[in-house]
Image (tube, rainbow, N blue to C red):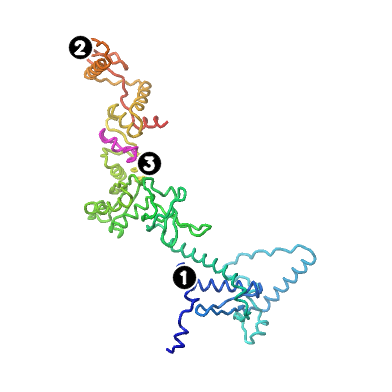
Amino acid sequence: GTPQDYTKNMPTELSLAIQQICEEKNLTLESVKETIEAAIASAYRKDFGNKLQNLKVDFDVETGAFDVFDIKEVVEDELKEEYEKMKAEMEALREAGEEIPVMKEREEIKEGEEEEKRFNPKNMISLSDAKLEKEDAKIGEQIIKKLAVPADFGRMAAQTAKQVIVQKLREAERNTIFNEYKDKQGELIMGTIQRREGRVVLVDLGTTTGVMPPMDQVEKENYRSGQRLKFYLRAVEEGQRGPEIIVSRATPEMLRKLFKLEVPEINSGAVQIKAVAREAGNRSKIAVWAKDDSVDPIGACVGQRGTRIQTVINELGGEKIDVIEWDEDVKKFIEKALSPAKVLAVELDEEHKVAKAQVNEDQYSLAIGKAGQNVRLAAKLTGWKIDIVMAGGGGTPEEVVEAVAEETGETNEAVAEISEERKEKSGEVTEIKSEEKVEEKEKKKKKKEEKSGEPKAEAEKPTDTPVEIPVAVAETPAEAVTEEIPAEIPAEEAVEEIKE
């Protein structure tokens, strides 16, 4: 084209500024243009217009020029007459000092009926008035009237327009951010730790700042400024200062999404994650199931030489993860959920949804886990309350005491004390041969006396006749000595008593 045409199409300083705003705030050109037009209309109405004008501004982004129009719809004369009559009646009541009746709300429109049309002088004009401006005006047509713009309007309206533009742009930016992150809710996003404000961690997500409340933080993780991590977008809410983006690293859903990201079989749907139980920062259990029998769901999640699961573990800061195969049979599922402990049998109480898992003595502590973690995660994973019991009467008292102490974190002495109280109440006596125990006690007694320097008491020679144990003696034949101990100490009851 000619040099004149080229100059005409060149972007002006104003258009460049508008484009810059669009890029910085991630807004569309149309939304910015609408904002400017609304600001000009507001400023014009304030200084030159009136409340009965339906103003519309046409703004040229390239040149900065604009025109102001008053747009009205042509309606029947009867509507205006009815409006004028109602207005006159209300004026008469006002002058007489009488109470003006409040207009009743429109009754609900029945199906098939049209809503009653009422005259609005702001955006309507009667047919007779419209014909004064345009002879061939018809009902339903729009009468567009161009309004004069004073020469000093730009200078006078600049401040008003600026305030409106800033406010509208802020609102548009908030809406854009809200819509962008609302679509990402329930997904994993990358973020950079910004800073701490009290117990809350602020995360830079790029276009906005996310919030990680204490409940969504992992206790063992130390969040440092500038640290880049993956986060689960838990919620997007409308706040007073704009959208609030809440992120999490402690939710079980994060584990589900990380596996979906690392395991193609889960992403494609060939392997499904049926349940997730997580104690963030410590240990998690995940139950997986394959649609096709030829696919190994656990192998798919672990990966060759554990590469896939190791990536997930590294992302979670070394959190241990147990992957088990989901089973439709509840008993089998509970057995697998209690791994690495080996379960002998599972009894179900369907009514109360309680499962009783029997294990050998050497598996009891393993089934319960450190501070009860293993059985607690298994219960979360399966949705059943699980009680761990020892097979064959619960094992020896010493083993039960040791296992219960490990589960509860109490000392062996504290557990044994409760066992003694239960023993005295129950009155149950179990016969045991204790000749070896007597000899052992005598040896310990001798060693004590030697260390203390006290005169040695004559050691009783071990004979075939048993020696009585001072704990609690029952009259028994000479062949055996009895020591009063509980036949069974159910671990669950002992735990409950300690907690109480």
Residue 285 coordinates in the image, percent (x, y): 32, 47
Would you say 426 lies left or right of 295 here? right
Q: Give the range drawn in magenta.
A: 352-375
Q: Disc 2 on helix, strand or loop? A: loop
Residue tagged 2: 461
The local crowd at label 2, few if under 14, some if 14 to 19, many if 20 or more residues have their Cα within 10 Å, is few
- Can you tell which of label 3 and label 1 is closer to the viewer? 1
x 55%, y 80%: residue: 65
Magenta region includes residue 429: no
Q: Residue 60, image x and y in percent?
A: 52, 79
Q: Looking at the picture, which amino acid does disc 3 mark?
A: Lys
For the residue pair 137 and 351, the one nearer the viewer reads as: 137
Q: Where is residue 108 in the image (x, y as percent from the top left)?
A: 61, 64
- The quarter in which the C terminus is drawn is top left
In 3D space, how far apart are the residues under numbered discs 2 and 1 (Cα atoms)? Answer: 101 Å
Give the residue pinned by disc 1.
Answer: 22
Q: Residue at x 29, y 27 (%)?
A: 398
Q: In this view, does 135 lie above or below 281?
A: below
The disc labelled 2 sits on which kind of residue? Lys
Viewer-proximal residue, 241 or 224? 224
How busy is the neighbourhood of tag 3: few (under 14 within 10 Å), some, or many (20 plus)? few
Task: In the rendered structure, find residue 261 and report the number of the disc placed on it.
Answer: none
Looking at the rendered image, the quarter that the N terminus falls into is bottom left
Please, is residue 182 above or below residue 222 in the view?
A: below
Which secondary structure lies at badge 3?
loop
What residue is shown with label 3? 353
